[in-house]
Image (tube, helix red, strand yellow):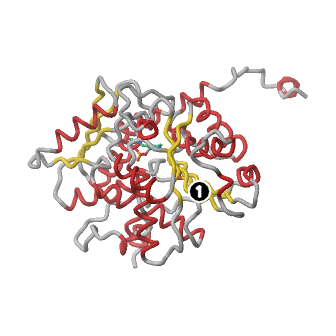
Amino acid sequence: MSAATILHDRGVIARYRAFLPCIGPQTPVISLNEGSTPLIHSPKLSALLGRGAQVYLKYEGLNPTCSFKDRGMTVAVSKAAEAGAQAVVCASTGNTSAAAAAYAARARLGSIVLLPAGKIALGKLVQAFAYGSKVIAIEGNFDDALRLVRELGEDRTSGIAVVNSINPFRLEGQKTASFEIIEELGEAPDVHFLPVGNAGNITAYWQGYREWHALGKAGRLPRMAGVQAAGAAPIFHDRLVEAPETVATAIRIGNPASWDGARAALRESGGHIDAATDAEILHAQAWLAREEGIFAEPASAASVAGLLRAHAGASTAFPLASLPEGASIVCVLTGHGLKDPEIAKAGLPEIRTVRAEKAEILRAMGA
Ligand code: F0G
């Protein structure tokens, strides 16, 4: 095998081809070696829960464009390239657009991204431009952008492939994260916490767990625990949210496309959906960075906020006490903290500049 082949064999298509029936021998593999992200044990969350519980953080911020979207995008863009598309298009709260732009660049396809004006975290916007995407800001929110993309996608002769998670190839790729968790733990966890926005990810994880359970690769299925932001919680309230609002812009969505998939995952797994306030989300984000050395974007921290809420008894739907001794719990951290530098910066104290002298440094250190 050549060096190029060996390197190429590290993405999710190479690793899980046998479980991705949409990938045929003719499909060009457009990969950036995504996936294989670390499952990091959290000693502090484990101790906090007690009763021998083990909490793990699946750090998806370590994908090539720093979010879980790369898993689905490698499959969706590979299929778009196979179908002879000229370009890809998506609506996004930022991470999907970054991933679409990167994989399109890799595949030599054009990319067009529709973003809610003023509501995209800076890092994600910079990524879309850096990867050479055509960025269109719309007067409206993500739900409006997705409606427009659906309309654009209706013209099958346009040569433009829609790569939102309404494209089933996206979910195919994203389900591989469940496989990785099962491989690392040797079993599915008891509970799986994750943030929920457009609901593609909860649908994909549940699909992945079910598939490997059916194949006997996992002896059980986890309970799926979805967490929405309180100001953008249509699934939690079971009604559309006209004007979703949250500091976690990635999940600022009022009409999730995969609502049915989320419903099925919650019902079939005996899971629950919860809503965390912005304050709880920001607290979880800061806590993760300070206590565990892991920096995740606000939407990602919603999973941990949900776990902390369950622990505090704030989420009546999910009594952690009903779990067995030594339960294993996975929280997915979907995107990197550097995606949203402005949110992180808002909490910074003022930085004081001192003279470059030892005495000054000692004084500044508070010695
Ligand atoms: N976490 C992050 C960091 C996200 O970017 C998203 C979704 C989610 C969680 C929720 O996942 O939508 O599958 O329920 N971001 C999409 C985007 C909407 O356009 O980047 P979901």
205 w.r.t. 343: above or below:
below
The quarter of the image holding the C terminus is top right
Most foreground residue, 296 or 242: 242
In-image side of 276 versus 97 (left or right): right
Q: Locate residue 73: give its quadrant.
A: bottom left
Which x, y percent locates residue 136?
27, 30
Q: Which residue is more in the foreground, 228 or 66? A: 228
User: Percent position (x, y) of residue 55?
Assistant: 66, 56
As displayed, is residue 5 above or below residue 120? below
Q: In which quarter of the image is the N terminus?
A: bottom left
Q: Name the residue under label 1.
A: 330
User: Residue 350: percent from the left, percent from the top?
Assistant: 69, 20
Query: Is residue 346 or residue 327 the one in the foreground?
Result: 327
Q: In this image, 58 relative to 90: left or right?
A: right
Classify mark 1: helix, strand or loop.
Answer: strand
Q: Is mark 1 within 8 Å of ligand 1?
A: no
Residue located at (78% from left, 25% from top): 356
Ligand 1 appears in which quadrant? Answer: top left
Three-letter amino acid code at the position of disc 1: Val
Identify the residue at image location x=17%, y=40%. 152
Residue 44 left/right relative to 101: right
Q: Is 300 located above or below residue 182 in the figure?
A: above
Image spot of residue 315 (x, y percent): 60, 41
Asked if residue 24 is positioned above or below residue 273 in the image, the reply reads below
Q: Which residue is drawn at 55% across and 48% down?
A: 333
Instruction: Classify mark 1: residues with Cα within 10 Å, few (<14), some (14-19) or many (20+).
Output: many
